[in-house]
Image (cartoon, coloured by chain):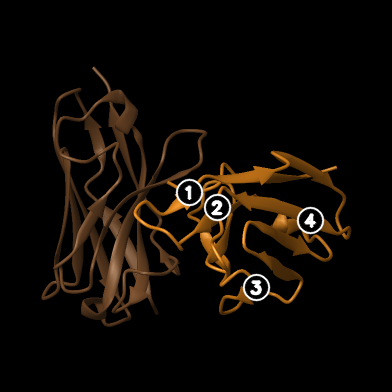
Amino acid sequence: QVQLVESGGGAVQPGGSLRLSCAASGFTFSRYCMHWVRQAPGKGLEWVAVMSFDGSNKFYADSVKGRFTISRDNSKNTLYLQMNSLSAEDTAVYYCARGRYYDLFGYMDVWGKGTTVTVSS
Amino acid sequence: EIVMTQSPATLSVSPGERATLSCRASQNIGSNLAWYQQRPGQAPRLLIYRASTRATGIPARFSGSGSGTDFALTISSLQSEDFAIYYCEQYDNWPPWTFGLGTRVEVK
């Protein structure tokens, strides 16, 4: 079945770095754009970043621009989020979500269970 | 950036009753709106896209309506598993993709 499994979360000190991974299965990963969405404790959903199906286009939320980098390896069916210069405001559950087939325009139809990132000294 | 405003923040409903949740966009988004359900401790799940199309496997008691700036999600007869938080999201004008703050549906 269609599945997304995030990993790589954990506790990190302010200013530190972390790389999240999202392993996809059950669908042709290389044909879909992919998103990262986060949710701070007790808060709503915040879109973080998106990458086109072939990696040629990527966009970021202003809150993470210049600090986070989205990437993908279609040969490994895996999406990544490199997070640098982390601060307490980045503490959240990070979800990867499947976007549109071949197109950035669209909603998110499949979500992973999320991985927790805690930034604290 | 398009701002999505959901109301009410919390809706208290008895099981079996009807619930109507509202979502307003700060500018015209056509029908490019999705609704998601998030149960406690779980990931969001797509319910509705294109404002009124149910996603695969979503029960018929969930319905979406609206276009332009005003949208609604209606749950015709609340079941126990429907008590959750519901988010609307616009995908018309991006980046960013933007979500509302959510409506919590709780047991009355």
Chain shown in brown: A
Location of mark 1 (residue): B2
Residue A65: % across, % down = 21, 41
* Nearer the camera: disc 4 or disc 1: 1
Residue on which disc 4 sits: B20
- Residue name at image x 55 percent, y 52 percent: B27
**First in residue order: circle 3 vs circle 4:** 4
Q: Earlier in the sequence, mark 2 or mark 1?
A: 1
Separation of disc 2 and disc 1 at Cα? 7 Å
- Residue beneath disc 3: B52
N-terminal of the two: label 4 or label 2?
4
Q: Along the polypeptide, which appears first: circle 3 or circle 1?
A: 1
- Label 4: chain letter: B
Marks 1 and 2: in contact by CB < 8 Å? yes
Residue located beneath label 2 in the image: B27
Residue at horizontal 48%, vertical 54%?
B43
- For marks 3 and 4, give the CA distance: 14 Å
Chain of the residue under label 3: B
Label 3 close to label 4 by CB (< 8 Å): no
Query: Are callouts 2 and 3 both on one chain?
Result: yes
Mark 2 and 3 residues: CB-CB less than 8 Å, in contact?
Answer: no
Q: Select label 3 or label 1 by which is in front.
A: 1
Say which label, 4 or 1, has the lower sequence index. 1
Say if labels 2 and 1 share a chain: yes
For label 4, the crowd category at 10 Å Cα-Cα, with few meaning under 14, some 14 to 19 and many 20 or more, is some
Question: Are the two marked residues, 4 and 2, in contact with CB atoms closer than 8 angstroms?
Answer: no
Drawn colour of chain B? orange
- Which of the 4 image quarters holds residue B55? bottom right
Residue positioned 76% across, 62% down in the render: B74
